[in-house]
Image (tube, rainbow, N blue to C red):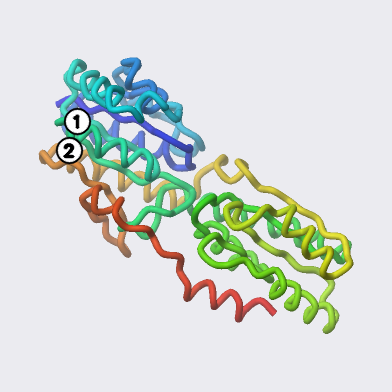
Amino acid sequence: MKIGVLTSGGDAPGMNAAIRAVVRRGISLGATVYGIRRGYEGLLDGDMFPMSVDSVGDIIHRGGTILHTARSARFMLPEGQDLAAARIRGAGLSGVIIIGGDGSLRGMVELCKRGVKAIGIPGTIDNDIAYTDYTIGFDTAVNTGVEAVNRLRDTATSHERIFVVETMGRHEGHLALAVGVAGGAESILVPELPVNIDEVCEKLKRGLDRGKVHSIIVVAEGAASGFDVAKQIEECLGMELRVTVLGHVQRGGTPTAFDRLLASRMGAKAVDLLASGQSNLMVGVSGPRLVATPTPEVLAVKKALDLDLYYLAQDLAR
């Protein structure tokens, strides 16, 4: 058995742990594992190489992906997908394991339509994939965001200021919500819900009236620009705010123990599924158990924001 593994789309902490698990589980089952560089773009170029046990040594703690990643405009076209499937067959691969977000999984489905056997592993800091409680990289990104909020709160307290912290999350607010709740933010703005600056200002005014000297506002980039939010609050309150955009800082860094464990379990499970002849499934986690769900079913559902957590945040932020 020959297995290919690639990482696609945005990188996420824990991808290396997943690659490591795929390679070592595959070799333990007697398979040859090929790394495919630069995601679907590298697949189109036939950029693949055999991986050994040693090739994935000393990477479990490293962020990013040793296979590198890219977004491929060529692969989005039917002829590109045809070529990618031909590359896989030409290399004699029995199947491919694809680590990435929803765009990567959609690409995987197209390969499966062309007769390729493939298993997906959800790797994205956005945690926006259905049928899994967590995606690889989310926990690390949350901890990175919370650490930033903790540091900003120190200086906000010292200078008696309001800080706006913009997190990543163009379409979903899972990351901003988790960072905001864990960081004790006074307000959290997410793309899934209307942005009400008047409500934010009223909450800030109530805090100021009772002597509160600092506040943190967390906003997902898809809800509004942190600078626009700050400007509107400044006009409302007549005071100067500070803005911090976390940006790609959230994608990097050493993965947490949680992400390393999750990635290791998912990587091994993906190999087991391929070895048993299964295909077009995504590995997810539900509670303590790993689950495998048909990928088209995963992509047909939008993962809902945890509204209970959102309203809890409103109660806790006073």
- Residue 119 found in image quarter: top left
In front of the other: 54 or 23: 23
Note whether 272 is above or below 223 in the view shown: above
Rendering coords of residue 98 (x, y %): 31, 36
Q: Is residue 297 above or below residue 280?
A: below
Query: Where is residue 68 shown, x and y percent of the image?
Result: 45, 27
Q: Position of residue 169 (x, y in %)?
A: 54, 51
In which quadrant of the rendered image does the N terminus lie?
top left
Q: CA distance from mark 1 to mark 2?
A: 7 Å
Instruction: Classify the position of the C terminus by image quarter.
Output: bottom right
Q: Which residue occupies 64% across, 59% down? A: 219
Q: Name the disc covering residue 116, or none.
A: none
Return the residue at label 2: 274
Q: Residue at x 56, y 40 (%)?
A: 252
Residue 213 horizontal/vertical position (percent): 84, 72
The reply to whether the C-beta atoms of the residues labelled 1 and 2 are less than 8 Å apart is: yes
Helix, strand or loop at label 2? It is helix
Which residue is identified by label 1?
95
Badge 1: residue crowd in 10 Å (few <14, some 14–19, many ≥20): many
Instruction: Give the answer, above or below, for where 228 lies relative to 212.
Output: above
Q: Residue at x 52, y 59 (%)?
A: 173
